[in-house]
């Protein structure tokens, strides 16, 4: 069975590197979803990837937007059935121009995993560590 990987916030930085790394390590039957909240940024990142071993597809995903999450999950279920690797990377950036207390809600809102995860799938949360999901939905 082919593997399905998703990377959130993959249009730049660590997320882009994760998507690229997965795309070059997985097999030709596998698919990596390079997701981004802004379509033009995601598509530009996809173009800059060039040739990869695995298939790579762009999908719009704002991890703070319930409608965006629901649409992506619906697409995944219909097209791929489930997900094997979730790289939960998207994060609002904390800047120095405003108090941290004003920015923390946005940061927390972006720090959540998404996807109908298959049993024994892998969840990677940047930058800390990878864990093995023991049961579906964990
Ligand atoms: N780089 C480091 O040294 C470092 C150190 C410690 C922790 N981390 C963690 O590693 C992760 C990535 O870091 P980074 O340096 O690569 O950060 P980054 O360059 O700021 O990239 C963050 C990514 O998250 C996306 N994002 C923000 N809000 C989003 C939303 N609501 N929905 C979907 N995507 C969203 C951004 O998209 P836009 O381009 O649209 O803003 C961007 O693609 C973060 O979780 C960060 O906390 C990084």
Image: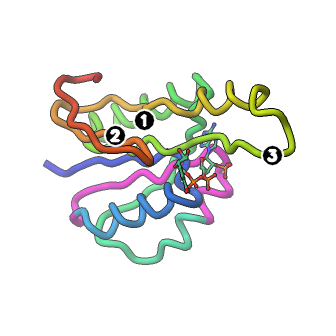
Q: CA distance from mark 2 to mark 3?
A: 42 Å
**N-terminal label among 3 and 1:** 1
- Residue 16 shows which numbered tag? none
Residue 84 location, quadrant: top left
Measured as percent of width and height from the top left, residue 70 is found at: 50, 25
**Residue at the spot 22% in from the left edge and 60% down from the top edge:** 29
Q: Is residue 65 magenta?
A: no
Residue closest to the eye, 39 or 131? 131
Q: How many residues crowd around disc 1 within 10 Å: few (fewer than 14), some, or many (20 or more)?
A: some
**Residue at the spot 71% in from the left edge and 42% down from the top edge:** 94
Which residue is labeled 1 in the image? 75
- CB atoms of marks 3 and 1 within 8 Å: no
**N-terminal label among 2 and 3:** 2
Q: Is residue 32 above or below residue 62?
A: below
78 left or right of 47 in image:
left
Q: Nearer the viewer, mark 2 or mark 3?
A: 3
Which residue is labeled 3 in the image? 96
Q: Is residue 102 above or below residue 7?
A: above
Which residue is labeled 2 in the image? 79
SS assignment at label 3: loop
Q: Which segment did they paint magenta?
A: 27-44
- CB atoms of marks 2 and 3 within 8 Å: no
Measured as percent of width and height from the top left, residue 65 is found at: 62, 27
Residue closest to the eye, 49 or 9? 9
Q: CA distance from mark 2 to mark 1?
A: 6 Å
5 left or right of 126 in image:
left
- CB atoms of marks 2 and 1 within 8 Å: yes
Measured as percent of width and height from the top left, residue 21 is found at: 36, 65
* Direction bottom: furthest residue: 51
């Amino acid at each position: 069975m082919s593997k399905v990987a998703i990377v959130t916030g993959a249009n730049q930085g660590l997320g882009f590197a994760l998507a690229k790394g997965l795309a070059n390590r997985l097999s030709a039957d596998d698919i990596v979803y390079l997701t981004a909240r802004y379509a033009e940024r995601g598509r530009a990142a996809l173009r800059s990837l060039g040739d990869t071993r695995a298939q790579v597809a762009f999908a719009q995903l704002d991890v703070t937007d319930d409608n965006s999450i629901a649409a992506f999950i619906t697409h995944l279920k219909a097209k791929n059935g489930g997900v094997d690797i979730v790289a939960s990377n998207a994060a609002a950036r904390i800047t120095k121009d405003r108090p941290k207390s004003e920015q923390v809600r946005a940061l927390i809102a972006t720090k959540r995993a998404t996807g109908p995860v298959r049993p024994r799938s892998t969840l990677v949360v940047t930058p800390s560590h990878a864990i093995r999901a023991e049961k579906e939905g964990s």
